[in-house]
Amino acid sequence: MTRIPRSHPRYRSLMIRERLVEGFKRGLVVPEGLIAHGRGEAFDYLLGEVSHPFALEAERATVAWLLTARRPVISVNGNYAALAAREIRGLAEATGAMVEVNLFYRTEERVKRIWRYLDEVGVPNLLPWDCEKTHIPGLESPRGITCRDGIASADFVLLAIEDGDRTEALVRAGKVVSAIDLNPFSRTAQTASITIVDEAIRATVNMERMARSMTREEALEARRSYDNLEVLKASFAAIFERLSHASKAGRPPAPSGGHEPLGSL
């Protein structure tokens, strides 16, 4: 990994890119995943690279479901594993949720590599890579292949860096779906029950912190009061405000009300 001094003004962004490059070299990330990351990073620029209040609200609702659902599952693809394996470990420890490797660009060898990496990091509740498989109804892509005791039987699924097809299919199947997606215009963001418009590492760090202090009563209230349409509206408004300010002042405003946890960077 390239040595990047912490004094570099783009230290965090560059370190995230290095994680993905290392993940690519290890066979965790596919070339298409690198392209997807660049698209998400562009939206993070528009959002000021912080967790906005609307993101924290969605993260709080997600934690509430992870703590109170009958059978919650965290779905992990190659990008999410390469970026946030240690943060996923913390969230799984704090919530007790199961963790399943699920891929669009799927080969059994790649599934095993990602599974072994998560296992090396110490991610708990990790469903076996060779679990009994079934298929998500109405989803023809390899991403429809899932563990019978995992996503297939879950009542709540947390997805990160996703495609819209599976989000739609899981919602149609009656599951509550939370999706981490920096692009609020995407089909994933528009289809999910809970849309976390935030960067994956920041979001996972935030959720672990929330999970370690949230009571059951707080979780049930967070579930009851959550409104995903309002969260999406707020994310659009934040992007519009920053673009509007930049068009008048020549620079975007400093983000307000957000914060930037670094995780294990």
Image (cartoon, grey):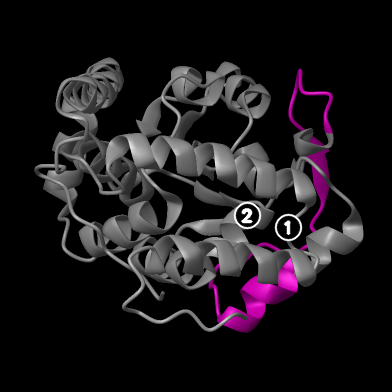
As drawn, the label of residue 79 is: 2
- Position of residue 108 relative to residue 113, above or below, is above
Work out whether residue 43 or residue 124 is closer to the camera in this orientation and state it: 43
Q: How would you rate the neighbour count of disc 1 (Cα within 10 Å): few for under 14, some for 14-19, many for 20 or more?
A: many
As drawn, the label of residue 109 is: none
Q: Position of residue 40 (x, y in %)?
A: 50, 40
Q: Secondary structure at mark 2?
A: helix
Query: At 77% from the left edge and 40% from the top edge, which residue is drawn?
Result: 104
Work out whether residue 100 or residue 40 is closer to the camera in this orientation and state it: 40
**As shown in the figure, which amino acid type bears the numbered disc 1?**
Val
Query: At 18% from the left edge and 54% from the top edge, which residue is drawn?
Result: 259
Residues tagged 2 and 1 counted as in contact (Cβ below 8 A): yes
Q: Quadrant of residue 185?
A: top left
State left or right for residue 35 relative to residue 38. Answer: right
As drawn, the label of residue 29 is: 1
Reply yes or no: does residue 118 show up in magenta.
Answer: yes
Residue span colored magenta:
114-141
